[in-house]
Amino acid sequence: MFPARGSDEEDVLKELEEKTGGDLTFDSGKILGSMCTHPHPLAVKVVQHYIDRNLGDPGLHVGSQGVEREAVDMLASLLGLEKGYGHIVSGGTEANILAVRAFRNLADVENPELILPESAHFSFIKAGEMLGVKLVWARLREDYSVDVRDVEEKITDNTIGIVGIAGTTGLGVVDDIPALSDLAMDYGLPLHVDAAFGGFVIPFAKALGYDIPDFDFRLKGVKSITIDPHKMGMVPIPAGGIIFRERKYLEAISVLAPYLAGGKIWQATITGTRPGANALAVWAMLKHLGFEGYKKVVKRAMELSRWFAAELKEIPGVYLVREPVLNIVSFGTRELEKVEEELKKRGWGISAHRGYIRIVMMPHVRKEHLEEFLRDLREILRNND
């Protein structure tokens, strides 16, 4: 019921604290299955200071619009492109929908179809339903990467584009993007790479010597990339990114918003009003950490994932779904649902809905957290014998 009279600020905050008492926090170390993390202190300061900025009305906040453009260009540079076109958006879901919308609008096909791996994020299901695009699912190989031959076999005159994943949600697998790029070029189709997670991991991991396929704009067939700063970029939620190779993709999804302060403004994002503070936080974090700073973050996460995978192999009845590619380790065990239930009773924020438990080595996850998790896992398995 809408309150008849207001309450004191102190009382409101106290009640709110009580009502959110059941939430898991990143600081607790109990959240092991999330691709988000506790935001960097600098990013928090930026959001707090610029909380009133609205990039949906850039005529009011011309400076913030310029900062967003710089942030997009820095992300494009990280992804191998000198000049990019895009926006800081609400997350990977919006970014993926925008890419599909651009492909559909430029293709001008009566019955549009999009080819994507069975491992693709559920956001593409939303995109298909919203945009009237039929999703054509390509099967996976034994290593859980997309079968490029199957992708080719599914190309028809209705195909508007192809999707590849650089860091799948469940296993962190990177598809053979170079082969998909060649395929896209051969058939004159655009390739979208969903690197929502991998975009802030792969460039740094490759610099550290990890053998990971190329995935970005250095491959000519890649026309758009999703990358999420609110994951390994440590920017507060929400902060996703969509980067297009050419301006025409952005223009294809832009609509006129004539009543805004800037006059004749064209909007390409799904949301109209959107937080400028988060885009400024992306800019601030890229400036603050730089390539070397993020490389240190990724180095720790990658090393932790390899250590954790080795520890799991020593536990009877536990098996890795596959060797980790990025900083994600997924494993299975007997009586998985029962094990998941027992782990959750002990406060662990994990999920086994895919048929395995996924642990993501985000910046808030420390070795002592994982050691405690392993102790609980071993004890639960012993009790189940």
Image: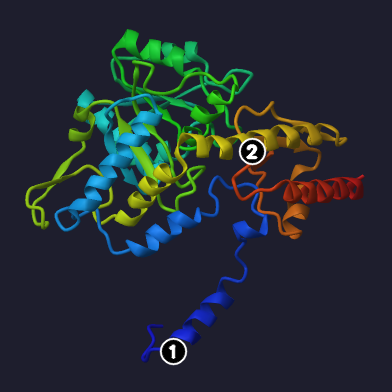
Instruction: Give the mark, 1 or 2, whose residue is nearer the N terminus.
Output: 1
Task: Say if 167 sits above or below 347 in the image.
Answer: above
Residue under label 1: 8
Using the image as rendered, state which of residue 316 and residue 340 is in the foreground: 316
Task: Say if 42 sits above or below 118 in the image.
Answer: below
Q: Secondary structure at mark 2?
A: helix
What percent of the width, then of the height, locates residue 55?
A: 24, 53
Q: Residue at x 76, y 43 (%)?
A: 336
Q: Is residue 109 visible?
A: no
Q: CA distance from mark 1 to mark 2?
A: 45 Å
Location of the N terminus by quadrant is bottom left
Task: Say if 287 sits above or below 213 in the image.
Answer: below
Discs 1/2, front = 2
Residue furthest top in the image: 186
- Please, what is the three-letter code of the amino acid marked with disc 1? Asp
Location of the C terminus by quadrant is top right
Q: Is residue 246 visible?
A: yes
Q: Is residue 58 left or right of residue 149?
A: left
What percent of the width, then of the height, locates residue 171?
A: 61, 32
What percent of the width, then of the height, locates residue 3?
A: 39, 86
**What label sits on residue 16 in the rendered view?**
none
Residue under label 2: 300
- Please, what is the three-letter code of the amino acid marked with disc 2? Arg
Using the image as rendered, state which of residue 201 and residue 316 is in the foreground: 201
Q: Are marks 1 and 2 in contact (CB under 8 Å)?
A: no
